[in-house]
Image (cartoon, rainbow, N blue to C red):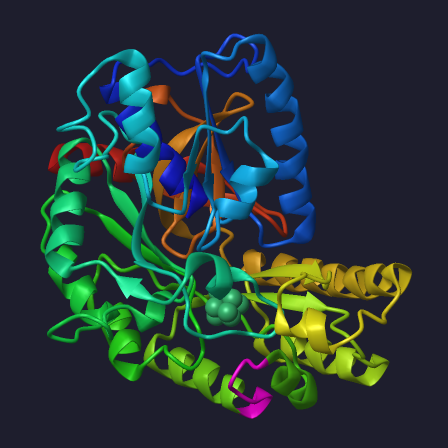
Amino acid sequence: MNKSDSERLATGLKELGLQENNDLESSDVIVLNTCVVRQSAEDTATGLLGKLKKIKRVKPEIVVAVMGCMVGPTSKTLSQRFPHVDAWARPQEFEKILEPVSQFVDNDISGCAPVLIPDKPKVTTFIPIIHGCDKFCSFCIIPYRRGREKSRAISEIFEETRLLVDRGVKEVTLLGQNVDSYGHDLNPQSDLADLFYSIHEIEGLERIRFLTSHPNDMSIKIIEAIRDLPKVCESINLPFQAGDNEILKVMRRGYSREEYFDKINLIRETIPNVSMTTDLIIGFPSETESQFYKSVEVLEKVRFDKVHASIYSERPGTIASRKHEDNISVEEKKRRLQVILSLQEKICSENNLRFQDQDLEVLVEGEKNGKLFGRSRLDKLVYLEGDKNIIGQLIMVKILQSTPWSLYGSIDSKIQSDFINVY
Ligand code: SF4
């Protein structure tokens, strides 16, 4: 979400005539886009604000702006604490930054704000479709900072996607804190499946992905749309967060482990070749050893393609922080994390073996350390040898080797020449 917001704001700033500059000291406009999902991230942002204070003291004419989740419903307290900041903007409040910058450069803001779409976007890009979250999981600060769910209209997202595709984008990832609840607040009501069907029609768009799902809101209609629409990739991130029912209850996740398994089964029965990834919190307050092993069991049973595991850290302002003491030691949390990482490495290694000798369709995204890289439909990172001019193309790649985290392949020359002929 933040990456997408930064790209959009950068587009507006370029429209105003500014150029990107990564050196703080020599910049005329400095924007700090903040994440506060963890207290440590907020502390980093606060530390940077101290550094910016010194720069502003030497060059009082520059514009310093802060955007993102650090800016809560009211920025009054923040502006008292950090008087050297000229503009405060909550997520997507781009005008609040573009306005003072336009005065600074003495340029007209009109025409910059409505279409904040990069001129030369990357081949894959993110499109936020719903902002905020209504769920209030006990460990999470997001609903307090990003507010309640607010969906963007299908027509607006369609138009933005079409424009991005015209400018070279081949793959879009539809974003939301809870992307599956998209559309419930629109009039008339709609859902993520309706949005899939709508943008699927866009000529030139090759792939559609989406992040992040909530088990309770992933409906059969959405699951069937993933199965039925060729452009929607069969790759689903479905966080389970904990494998024990007591912990899930205290987390206020709204489902039991049995219900989670039912949802996984429904997805796998409907979309046989689906790849599943998940998020897991380790060491939630009072999590016992046996409750932790319930999470381990979920991993063994579901055999996810990727697990984003993080150790619990108290987040002031959340229900968990108010009601539950963070009583698992850091050493114990790290030990449990190691158990998860070792197990998941083994599972990923076994899962990825199945791709060896297979031909996978890869969207080539760029070059790193002399190798091209891209992703398969199932969101597998694939490295390959080849000429840079295939960046941005869908290519068939024969997989020769696999590791737990990525695949290595070569371009099948016959398939590639057929592909180039078709396109
Ligand atoms: S669903 Fe996700 S964003 Fe919403 S409160 Fe729960 S963890 Fe936070």
In x, y percent, where is residue 387?
37, 21
Specify whether residue 55 is painted magenta.
Answer: no
Q: Nearer the viewer, residue 58 or 142?
A: 58
Mainly helix, strand or loop, the magenta region? loop
Per the rendered image, the range of residues in magenta is 252-258
Specify whether residue 254 is painted magenta.
Answer: yes
126 relative to 31, above or below:
below
Q: Nearer the viewer, residue 188 or 50?
A: 50
In x, y percent, where is residue 220?
29, 83
Which of the 4 quarters of the picture holds residue 160?
top left
Q: Nearer the viewer, residue 139 or 85?
A: 85
Is 138 positioned to the left or the right of 311 in the image?
Answer: left
323 relative to 363, above or below:
below
Which of the 4 quarters of the picture holds residue 250?
bottom right
Whether residue 420 appears in this view of the structure is yes
Q: Residue, x 44% and y 55% (percent of image)?
A: 73
Is 168 positioned to the left or the right of 277 in the image?
Answer: left
Q: Residue, x 61% and y 72% (percent of image)?
A: 241
Q: How many marks?
A: 0
